[in-house]
Amino acid sequence: MMNVMIVEDETIMRLALTTLIDWGSNGFRIVYEASNGYQALQYIKENRDIDIVITDLKMPVMDGLELIDELNQLDGISPHVVILSAYDDFGFVRKAFKKGVNDYILKSEMDPNVVLDLMCRIKHDCEVEQTMSKQSREIFNGERIRLKQQTIREWLEIGVNPQLEPSNLEDLNMRFEWTNITVSVIRVEGLAEVQERYGSSIGKFVSSVLKSIDQVLTEVGTGEVISCNPYEYVVLLSFRTSSLIYVRQSISQILDQIIFVLREYTNLQVTIGVSELCEELRQIPEFYLQARKNADLRFVINKHRIIYPEDARHFLKQSGETLIGKEQTLLDALKEGKEQSVLQELDKMFTLIKRSASMGNEVLRARYMELLMILVKFMYDNGFVNSQEIKRIEDVYQMAWQIDSAERLQTRISNLVLQLLQEIDKQAGQMNRVVAIAQEFIMEHYNEDITLGKVSGIVHLSEGYFSTLFSNAVGETFKEFVTKVRMKKAMESMKKEPYLKIYEIAERTGYASTEHFSRVFKKATGVSPNQFMRSVSK
């Protein structure tokens, strides 16, 4: 069993990580959660059995980079560090890599299977390190493959180190040149079917896809592939010539072969987004994002095809007024679950779409698909997608290319949104019931020792998540609510039984210390308990 520590200042993110996978059954144990690097460091100094540290980079008191520096200086302690990063953390990520960190998790793309695969690989590597000598580890082929894939990930996210020597590529056995590079993002279609087919064996699926793609690249003698998650793969191709005609022909042949192999041997349909020709290594992150955006257009152009840069430019040029950048009000209304506001904003989007009608039915359909893409992304980002939602989305998608009535299509999209609102309302109702149970417990047990930990345990939530949920629902913190209830009960006792002693009232309302009760009472009411009792006894 490997001991894992999570270091993250955001309570929701810590909760997401602790509940993302079944840690225990996979050989891991989360032994501590820290909200900043300083807390983590103090714990590790006293408990030297931490194997893996998953840490955010941007935190108060002590950030992730400072924590890594401190860990590197500790004698006899060398936990494996995994960093949590966002797309705008490139500078921090680069510094982390320089400090010896090799693994990271993108916050925006935390997939349970990807995280589990990463943790299992780390566990495997640690077990290998324990059983193999240093010399044998250096020649261990699996380590070289891992390092190669990690190097490519670093290129995609934060760029290529200008000091990197060509010999390093040879050491990693890379089929790669320094110039004329293209980035291709391969998206697997039919996510529900893949999940159903492979279930908990998703790691075998990823391995099968990687082997199939690598087989093609080996045959052509160029290119590398890595997996970003089970449904997205990145292929880097490089060419000795800058001839656009030759490069395009070569890319087309290689990607067509990849599509064929995946269809024949793994029964997969894919869409591929291709970047421009990258002439400088420092441009790789920019062109990676371009390839991802082109792959995203599968929702509005078509799936099961290769989308080249000129395809994307032609579509955007012919598509009239785009919805991208105008969707925030709709998404805000969805987050709040306000049905009337959502439907009003949806009507505004429909009106905006209809302005493209003069450009032809194909453009009109594309605009509706763009709206659907916005809704799909919201559902993914907020955890509302399951196999049923996927099926409904794909039904609407297919309908968009066959329907001859915009009104019918709008009705289908509206129904999808109404179903989403029902799910949001259902979740909100569940959370409201949790808060109601907590309030009822406080009202009945205000005279006892009530703690956040005790009440969060009753409703089966972590302290951090319950605290945030309670504050958002009630409009005041847990502690403030408990104090308000106790003060109300204290004043009621003073009015009904003015002969009681202050210490007796304190004990009745859950305070062991009369002095503490008096301070809290005066802060809450503006007068001392004695002054209040004199005023009500007149």
Image (spheres, rainbow, N blue to C red):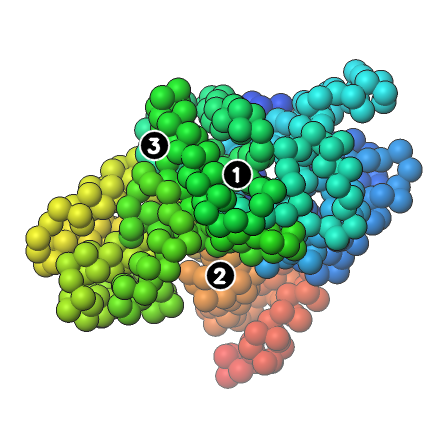
| Amino acid found under the numbered disc labelled 2 | Ser
Of residue 467 and residue 517, the one placed in the foreground of this image is 467
Q: Classify 10 Å Cα crowding around label 2: few (below 14), some (14-19), many (20 and above).
A: some
Percent x, y of residue 241: 58, 45
Q: CA distance from mark 2 to mark 3?
A: 46 Å
Q: Secondary structure at mark 1?
A: strand
Q: Is residue 378 visible?
A: no
Looking at the rendered structure, the kind of residue marked 1 is Val
Please tell me whether mark 2 sits on a helix, a strand or a loop.
helix
User: Of marks 2 and 3, which one's residue comes earlier in the chain?
Assistant: 3
Judge depth for marks 2 and 3 and give the one in front: 3
Q: Residue at x 27, y 64 (%)?
A: 318
**Between 332 and 443, the one nearer to me in the picture:** 332
* Residue 82 screen position, x and y as percent: 68, 41
Residue that carries the numbered disc 3 in the rendered image:
269
Pointer 1 and pointer 3: residues touching (CB < 8 Å)? Answer: no
Residue 149 showing in the rendered view: yes
Q: CA distance from mark 1 to mark 2?
A: 46 Å
